[in-house]
């Protein structure tokens, strides 16, 4: 059994999608970041950085409970645990990991800043809106080129796609029409049709 500490954000949904795709048994614990629950002492013990998601795998390495935070690290760990969604071959593995890192270092932070300045800033900051909106569209262009002649970001459906999908699912939040990026739209629609993805996107209830 795995305990998942999460909230309804793209980073949280990466892990719930992965758990559903792997068919692993898990319990969901809501951490309401709007109420600051991520700063409670019991959660800080799981993640000193006070960010969701975090997991506790009670059947971890050597059969012992194992705590883990950072969504990218959790995805890699779960891929190893279930033996899926990260190719075994060296070339395929590192192609998937490079696109996972593209999400972790680019898509997540930049899309997130766009969300913030368009939706949450107390007053408009035109420079920030322009800067992050332009970078968000540039990253969509990178994804669109990558997906022009392939079904997935790496050689097969992988944790790179699982990590990126929940951020693209908020395209309306950063004022991007997916029709402008047809290869991204085709990829997005195909992944959205996966039953495990639909279940994972509904977590937490």
Image: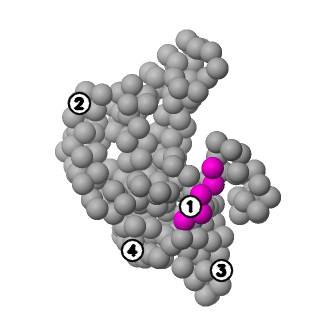
Q: Which residue is mark 4?
A: 23
Secondary element at image label 1: helix
Q: Which residue shows up at 23% across the image and 51% down it?
A: 190
- Rounded to the nearest whole Å, what is the CA distance between mark 1 and mark 3? 16 Å
> In this rendering, would 22 be left or right of 73?
left
Q: Which residue shows up at 77% across the image and 55% down it?
A: 40
- Rounded to the nearest whole Å, what is the CA distance between mark 1 and mark 4? 19 Å
Question: Magenta span covers which residues?
Answer: 28-32
- Rounded to the nearest whole Å, what is the CA distance between mark 2 and mark 4? 32 Å
Q: Nearer the viewer, mark 1 or mark 3?
A: 3
- Rounded to the nearest whole Å, what is the CA distance between mark 4 and mark 3? 19 Å
Residue 29 in the image: state x and y as whole percent.
59, 63
Identify which residue, 173 or 202, lies in the foreground.
Answer: 202
> In this rendering, would 172 be left or right of 64?
left
Residue 170 in the image: state x and y as whole percent.
41, 38
- Lower position in the chain sequence, tag 4 or tag 3: 4
Look at the image and say whether residue 30 sits in the magenta stretch. yes
Position of residue 188 relative to residue 86, above or below, is above
Give me the disc on residue 73.
1
Q: Which residue shows up at 57% across the image and 83% down it?
A: 59
Q: How many marks?
A: 4
- Rounded to the nearest whole Å, what is the CA distance between mark 2 and mark 1? 32 Å
Q: Which residue is mark 3?
A: 65
Position of residue 179 relative to residue 53, above or below, is above
- Lower position in the chain sequence, tag 1 or tag 4: 4
């Amino acid at each position: 059994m795995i305990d998942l500490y999460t909230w309804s954000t793209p980073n949280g949904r990466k892990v719930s999608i992965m758990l559903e795709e792997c068919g692993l048994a898990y319990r969901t614990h809501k951490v309401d970041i709007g109420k600051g629950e991520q700063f409670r002492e019991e959660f800080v013990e799981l993640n000193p950085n006070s960010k969701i998601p975090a997991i506790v795998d009670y059947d971890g390495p050597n059969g012992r409970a194992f705590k883990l935070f950072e969504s990218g690290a959790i995805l890699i760990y779960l891929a190893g645990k279930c033996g899926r969604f990260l190719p075994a071959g060296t070339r395929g593995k590192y192609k998937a990991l490079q696109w996972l890192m593209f999400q972790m270092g680019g898509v997540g932070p930049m899309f997130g800043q766009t969300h913030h300045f368009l939706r949450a800033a107390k007053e408009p900051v035109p420079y920030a809106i322009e800067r992050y909106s332009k970078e968000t569209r540039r990253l969509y262009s990178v994804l669109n080129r990558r997906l022009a002649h392939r079904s997935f970001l790496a050689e097969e459906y992988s944790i790179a796609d699982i990590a990126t999908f929940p951020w693209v699912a908020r395209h309306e939040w950063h004022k991007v029409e997916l029709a402008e990026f047809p290869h991204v739209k085709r990829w997005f629609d195909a992944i959205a049709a996966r039953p495990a993805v639909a279940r994972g996107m509904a977590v937490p209830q």
